[in-house]
Image (tube, grey):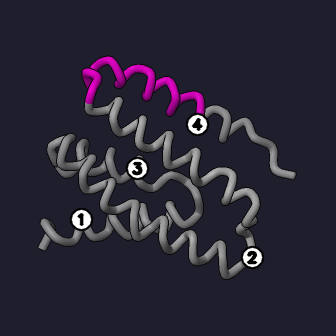
């Protein structure tokens, strides 16, 4: 039962956090690798699959609430797709150890900026 319950709870909790914009996928990666003993490569693959339905639900919710701006989307989506393709290529072309530190720095800076941000 524990083999099913703990991953299910982790998925539900990080899904809720993702809906709030907290970055549940990153937390899911940490839970899977640190607490559930999942191999990091497998955890990354699960995280990518986890992202698709949570992003789709977020997109539908934002659309329903009228929070999507078509001009912004048409300007940002093509560049985002190019950046995602380049990032995916770089992640397979470069050594993982070379990418680990810059990604860690990025996460730290993003966390500090999130904590320092003042609400309007």
Residue 89 screen position, x and y as percent: 33, 35
Is 42 positioned to the left or the right of 105 in the image?
left
- Looking at the picture, tell me which residue is in the foreground, 33 or 100: 100
Mark earlier in primary sequence (3, 1):
1
Mark 3 in CB contact with mark 4 (< 8 angstroms): no
Residue drawn at x 27%, y 70% as measured from the top left: 8
Q: Tag 4's secondary structure?
A: helix
Q: Nearer the viewer, mark 3 or mark 2?
A: 2
Mark 3 Cα shell of 10 Å, populated few (<14), some (14-19), many (≥20):
some
Write down the residue under mark 4: 111
**Mark 3 vs mark 4, CA separation in Å:** 13 Å
Rounded to the nearest angstrom, the CA distance separating label 3 from label 1 is: 14 Å
Q: Nearer the viewer, mark 2 or mark 1?
A: 2
Residue at the spot 75% in from the left edge and 40% down from the top edge: 117
The residue that disc 1 covers is: 6
Q: Specify which label sits upstream in the sequence, 2 or 4.
A: 2
Q: Residues within 10 Å of mark 2 (few under 14, many from 20)?
A: few
Q: Classify mark 3: helix, strand or loop.
A: helix
The relative height of residue 110 versus residue 55 in the rendered view (above or below) is above
Magenta segment: 93-110
Disc assigned to residue 66: 2
> Which numbered disc flags the more N-terminal residue, 2 or 1?
1
Percent x, y for residue 32?
25, 50
The reply to whether dot 2 and dot 1 touch (C-beta < 8 Å) is no
Circle on res. 15: none
| Helix, strand or loop under label 2 | loop
Counting residues from the N terminus, which is met first, the one under dot 3 or under dot 4?
3
Mark 4: few, some, or many residues within 10 Å (few <14, many ≥20)? few
Q: Nearer the viewer, mark 3 or mark 1?
A: 3
As helix, strand or loop, the secondary structure at mark 1 comes to helix
The residue pinned by badge 3 equals: 27
What kind of secondary structure does the magenta stretch mostly adopt? Answer: helix
């Amino acid at each position: 039962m524990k083999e099913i319950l703990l991953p299910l709870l982790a998925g539900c909790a990080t899904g809720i956090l993702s809906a709030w914009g907290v970055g549940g996928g990153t937390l899911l990666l940490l839970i899977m690798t640190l607490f559930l003993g999942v191999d990091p490569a497998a955890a990354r693959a699960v995280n990518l699959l986890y992202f698709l339905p949570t992003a789709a639900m977020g997109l539908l919710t934002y659309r329903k609430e009228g929070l999507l701006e078509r001009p912004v989307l048409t300007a940002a989506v093509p560049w985002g797709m190019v950046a995602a393709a380049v990032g995916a290529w770089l992640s397979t072309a470069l050594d993982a150890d070379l990418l680990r530190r810059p990604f860690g720095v990025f996460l730290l800076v993003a966390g500090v900026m999130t904590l320092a941000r003042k609400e309007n």
